[in-house]
Image (spheres, helix red, strand yellow):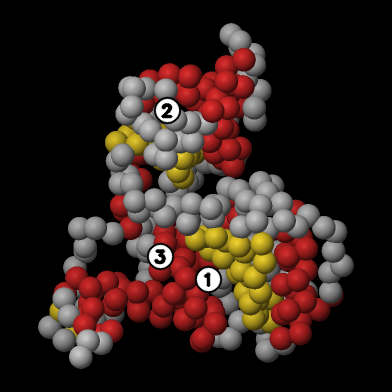
Amino acid sequence: METTYYSLGSKATFNKALRHFYAVNDAVSEIESTNNIADYLNNLLDEEELNRDQILPLIGAVLKDKFNYSYHSFSAKNTITDFEKIANETCKWSALDLVIIYYAPDGARFAINPKDADSWERAREIHKDQLIVVYAKFIKEKNSKLETESMKTLQALVGGKDVFINKEFIDKTIVPKKAPAKAKPQPQQKTQQQHHAGFQMQPETEGPAARFAATPATAPTLAESASVQIQGRAPQAGGSKKTITPKYGVQVSNELFHNGNVEAWKKILESYQVKYPDLTVHIMYEGEVINDINSLFKWGKVKHGDSIFFQVSGEEIIGVSKLQKYLYEGASQRYTQFLKLGIGRVLNLF
């Protein structure tokens, strides 16, 4: 008789499950240290040590079952691209730990620390009518009533409403924490015993490096893409503070990504880099780093439904949400708006 344990009968699946169990164990330690689990998960995603399809099982096992967080779901009433007001307000709620899971239209699941604007920016845009699930826990003790009130207040904030903040959301004895810097996490499996029942943990040939934003396209590593400079700009010297965003997909909704779409993208990227000259945009398609964006134009090469990916690198990365929005427009039938405006001049988009 078949059982669920049959899936652990090979070395590859056993090691995969074991890595997930280690990630769950580390997530428990993070919460016990009063850290936000969304920050932990996003660090693992940045280091390609976690797949996006692990987010929901981790949240269920740790927040729901282990720590008994309250949770509440709702649909976004409006499309949101500016998250500063939400982050600036919720970062004061020191008495509560809050986590958001956002279900994006392309199937991706984002873990968001609502107290940190950079965490929101990972989703770039909260789309109208998409599902949002909020998890909340009163840090010092279980308080379901206060947790429910905080989740409803956060829902109102996401909906753009002015809200009354319960003073019990703030514990003056607790210093609000900022999200940790994007550094490589040190999960416990690095030091724990690596052998079990005759199996040895080994890296898989297929893994998180081939997946992001729930899109099965293969992409280059961060090191590879960081060497590419649109418009031939050289990397900055020093670079101790230089970071690079995760890879973000822009789905082509035009019938083909033709020359008009390419020209629109060139205008958009030109506008972005004139506004932010210290930032660099990296373009990728089908696992290939695109040095010359004109190479994307080949009749039928990039078709409707395909995704082109980009990253931004630099010291203080901003404007990425707008960049993704405009690139999406440029890959649609609405690309002509970028060609009509400011002919012969740099567009003022950012």
The reply to whether residue 119 is visible in this rendering is yes
- In the image as oriented, which residue stretches furthest toward the left? 198
> Looking at numbered disc 2 in the image, what kind of residue is underneath it?
Phe
Give percent across and percent down for residue 222: 35, 45
| Number of the label disc, if any, that sits on residue 77 | none
Which mark sits nearer the N-terminus, 3 or 2? 3
| Number of the label disc, if any, that sits on residue 257 | 2
Question: How many C-alpha atoms fall within 10 Å of the one at disc 2: few (<14), some, or many (≥20)?
Answer: many
Give percent across and percent down for residue 76: 68, 58
Task: Give the quadrant of residue 154.
Answer: bottom right
Is 261 left or right of 292, judged from the image as shown?
Answer: right
The quarter of the picture where the N terminus appears is bottom left
| Marks 1 and 2, how far apart at CA | 39 Å
- Please tell me whether mark 3 sits on a helix, a strand or a loop: helix
Q: Which residue is mark 3?
A: 53
| Number of the label disc, if any, that sits on residue 37 | 1
Residue at 66% from the left image edge and 62% from the top image edge:
75
> Looking at numbered disc 3 in the image, what kind of residue is underneath it?
Asp
Quick one: 285 or 184, which is closer to the camera? 285
Nearer mark to the viewer, of 1 and 2: 2
Residue at 55% from the left image edge and 85% from the top image edge:
67
Circles 1 and 2: CB atoms closer than 8 Å: no
- Please tell me whether mark 1 sits on a helix, a strand or a loop: helix
Residue at 64% from the left image edge and 16% from the top image edge:
341
Is 65 left or right of 345, judged from the image as shown?
Answer: left
Question: How many C-alpha atoms fall within 10 Å of the one at disc 3: few (<14), some, or many (≥20)?
Answer: some
Residue at 29% from the left image edge and 36% from the top image edge:
288
